Image: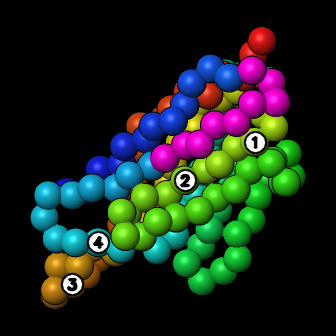
Amino acid sequence: QVQLVESGGGLVQPGGSLRLSCAASGTGSPFSILDMGWYRQAPGKQRELVAAMPSGGSTNYADSVKGRFTISRENGKNSVYLQMNSLKPEDTAVYYCNVRIRIWTGVENPVKDYWGQGTQVTVSS
């Protein structure tokens, strides 16, 4: 019903920048993004929260990315973004977007969580 498609990953040198995008689309009822977050998982590591933007609260970031990453949303396109600046080798990971969506069915208007397929970010010289 709703799918998330991530893009923007790739290979970048240390100090470079990337902008990750996560676009939500569906074939049926319209929907609204409520909460969103970006996670990452490096080889041999657990998945960790990088940045979050709850609908009713302020943004928050992992200490390791504060001042370098910025999470944002574009509701008109049902998209969320992660701007990553001053990238470091330790930022290398697969990045996943997580979005909580309300689907406007006109009756129940359910809330559901979705995950993107993941996009690889590699920071290396």
Label 3 sits on residue: 108
Q: Amino acid at mark 4?
A: Phe
Task: Give percent across and percent down for residue 18.
Answer: 63, 37
Earlier in the chain: of badge 1 and badge 4, it is 4
Q: Disc 1 vs disc 4: which is toward the camera?
A: 1
Nearer to me, 31 or 100: 31
Residue 31 numbered mark, or none: 4
Are the two marked residues, 4 and 2, in contact with CB atoms closer than 8 angstroms? no
Residue 85 marker: 1
Q: Position of residue 72 (x, y in %)?
A: 59, 62
**Label 3 to label 1: alpha-carbon separation:** 41 Å
Secondary structure, mark 3, is loop
Label 2 and label 1: CA atoms lie apart by: 13 Å
Q: Which x, y percent locates residue 11?
A: 62, 20
Against 110, residue 25 (above or below) is above
In this rendering, would 1 be left or right of 72?
left
The residue stretch that appears in magenta: 13-21
Q: What type is the residue that disc 1 sits on?
A: Asn
Give the vertical position of 108 relative to 65 (above or below).
below
Q: Which residue is mark 2?
A: 81
Secondary structure found at label 2: strand
